[in-house]
Amino acid sequence: MGPCTITLNGITVKAITASLALCLGAGSAGACQRPEALRPLPPPPGPGITPAPLPAAAASAASDGGPPLDYRERLRPTPYGWPTRASWCVWIEPGATTGPAAVWDQRWLGAVAAALASWEQVLPIRRAQEPGQAHILIWRRKPRLQNNRASHGRAELELVEVERSGQWQIEPLVTVAISPGQAQTAIQATALHELGHAFGLWGHSDQASDVMAVSPGAKPLLQLSPRDRATLGWLYRQQGLNSGGVRPAAGPALPAPGAN
Ligand SMILES: [Zn+2]
């Protein structure tokens, strides 16, 4: 059993070419904003769902013949491109600050914040003040059983069309559930892994020393491995969402998430 379950809408239908530069440190100014409107994405263009092609380049090989330096070939894009962003707004479910639940809620919050801090070293991340402003929502709860399997964490990706300043664009909307019923280091390791999915690493490494390993090792991993960083660096040089000239969908707009 893996550490989590991935839900990824759709399977890629187009080849991806490297074009976008990694925007480390860019685009992170300003507060997280609620979009003016939000609606589901129309079905992807093209004849239908086809198996995901391998990324354009094979994984870079270590010069000494050892394991590959990254695990890019194990990631999957969406039909609209790789679900990455130049900057991310993340909302974390608040917890009790007084009363009997406070110690447990604050323990969970501390572990999640520590995991987020690891990703802040390599990605522009801002904290959203409310769920409707966020691309990633982190909830303090045990994920629902899936295929009768229990897990401590889960990330689920949706793509939505969002109107900002009168312009419609595709954005990822990721829901992350992190169970509080674990040791603090295990919560941090779970959050670190699930956040990797949320930031676009929709796949698993086959090496236990990577945060994105398919199954957790005996010792919780609390830091990104060189392969995690290298894979992320490759991912953020690929074509992101909104690069394919996708047309806005017909139909009524939905209220922004968290509205009403
Ligand atoms: Zn996973």
Image (cartoon, helix red, strand yellow):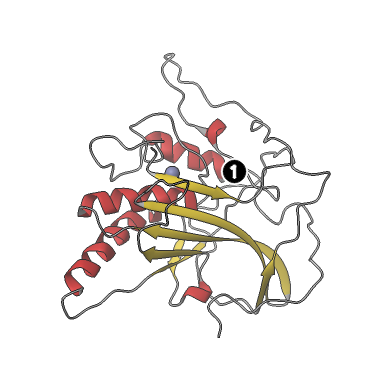
Of the four image quadrants, the one with ligand 1 is top left
91 or 66, which is in the foreground?
91
Residue 86 position in % (x across, y down): 56, 57
Q: Is residue 177 left or right of residue 257?
A: left
64 or 158, which is in the foreground?
158
Disc 1 crowd rating (10 Å Cα; few below 14, some 14-19, many 20+) is some
CB of residue at label 1: within 8 Å of ligand 1? no
Residue 168 position in % (x across, y down): 72, 69
Q: Residue at x 20, y 52 (%)?
A: 183
Q: Is residue 161 left or right of residue 247?
A: left
Q: Is residue 148 left or right of residue 52?
A: left
Name, please, the residue furthest toward the bottom. Answer: 260
Q: Looking at the picture, does residue 133 appear above or below residue 180?
A: below
> Is residue 17 visible in this depiction of the protein?
yes
- Amino acid type at circle 1 is Arg
The quadrant of the rendering that contains the C terminus is bottom right
Q: For mark 1, what is the residue?
A: 237
> Would you identify the image quadrant in which residue 235 lies?
top right
Q: Residue at x 28, y 60 (%)?
A: 180
Q: Looking at the picture, does residue 78 appear above or below residue 165?
A: above
The quadrant of the rendering that contains the N terminus is top left
Q: Looking at the picture, does residue 43 appear above or below residue 236?
A: below
Residue 231 position in % (x across, y down): 49, 37
Q: Is residue 36 left or right of residue 22?
A: right
Residue 129 position in % (x across, y down): 43, 77
Name, please, the residue furthest toward the front. Answer: 148
